[in-house]
Image: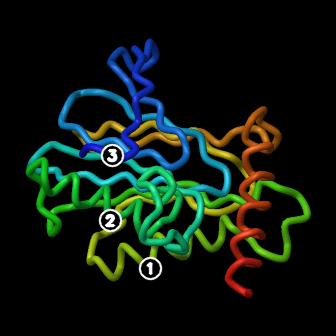
Amino acid sequence: MSGLPIATNRYFDNHFERPGVKLLPNEFYTTAEDMVLMTVLGSCVAACLHDPFAGIGGMNHFMLPDDGADAGAAASEAMRYGAYAMEVLINELIKAGGRRERFEAKVFGGAAVLAGMTTINIGDRNADFVRRYLALERIRITAEDLQGVHPRKVAFMPRTGRAMVKKLRLQVPGVTEREAALAREADRLRAERQR
């Protein structure tokens, strides 16, 4: 897994009474350990995959649906795109002993948290992308909480596949700023493609 943007923010989660890892945008994590994977989402999407037979799972956190990364892009930059983030998560779970045909998915995020974002709704595009991608890969979605206007805090137990979601206030410090930066980045990428 060298060179891949594996989440490194480990901590002990007092609420769940187990070790945890906090995932930031463009990161992923896979494990068979009894732990909790946490992330906060706005328009970004987190896909949580679980192999119930092998008792392993993982989560990714991607920002944009399109695979707009060039071939020479660093892995951490490419992870912002859904196609790459999903491919990495699936491949790392297979390397750890998971079987694609047993994978179950739970998907979250894709909210429209910025008022006035009508020209391009990144959240809707992310939600549509993850549903289409998983359908093409024949990975069953067993739970989803996508779209709407609320940011979400997601807790996922990779060993059991259990996931919990808490919808957050509309204005969460850090999330709004990250969403505004994401909107600017999406506009920049769209402008580059039109050249």
Give how far across and how far down residue 132 sits, in percent.
Answer: 44, 79
Question: Callout 1: few (<14), some (14-19), or many (20+) C-alpha neighbours within 10 Å?
Answer: few
Indicate whether 44 appears above or below 192.
above
Question: Callout 3: few (<14), some (14-19), or many (20+) C-alpha neighbours within 10 Å?
Answer: few
Q: Secondary structure at mark 1?
A: helix
Q: Which mark is residue 105?
A: none
Residue under numbered circle 3: 3
**Residue 20 is drawn in which quadrant?**
top left
Give the residue type that dot 1 points to. Answer: Arg
| Quadrant position of the N terminus in the picture | top left
Residue under numbered circle 1: 132
**Residue 133 is drawn in which quadrant?**
bottom left
* 190 sits to left or right of 110: right
* 130 sits to left or right of 192: left
**Residue 169 is drawn in which quadrant?**
top right
Q: Secondary structure at mark 2?
A: helix
Give the residue type that dot 3 points to. Answer: Gly
Give the residue type that dot 2 points to. Answer: Glu
Inter-mark Cα distance, 2 to 3: 15 Å
The structure's colour scheme is: rainbow
Residue under numbered circle 2: 87
Q: Earlier in the sequence, mark 2 or mark 1?
A: 2
Indicate whether 78 appears above or below 36.
below
Report the front residue among 7 and 107.
Answer: 7
Q: Nearer the viewer, mark 1 or mark 3?
A: 3
| Labels 1 & 3 near each other (Cβ < 8 A) | no
Indicate whether 62 appears above or below 35.
below
Q: Nearer the viewer, mark 2 or mark 3?
A: 3
Residue at 84 percent across and 77 percent down: it is 119
| Quadrant position of the C terminus in the picture | bottom right
Give how far across and how far down residue 128 sits, in percent.
Answer: 55, 75
Residue at 85 percent across and 66 percent down: it is 117
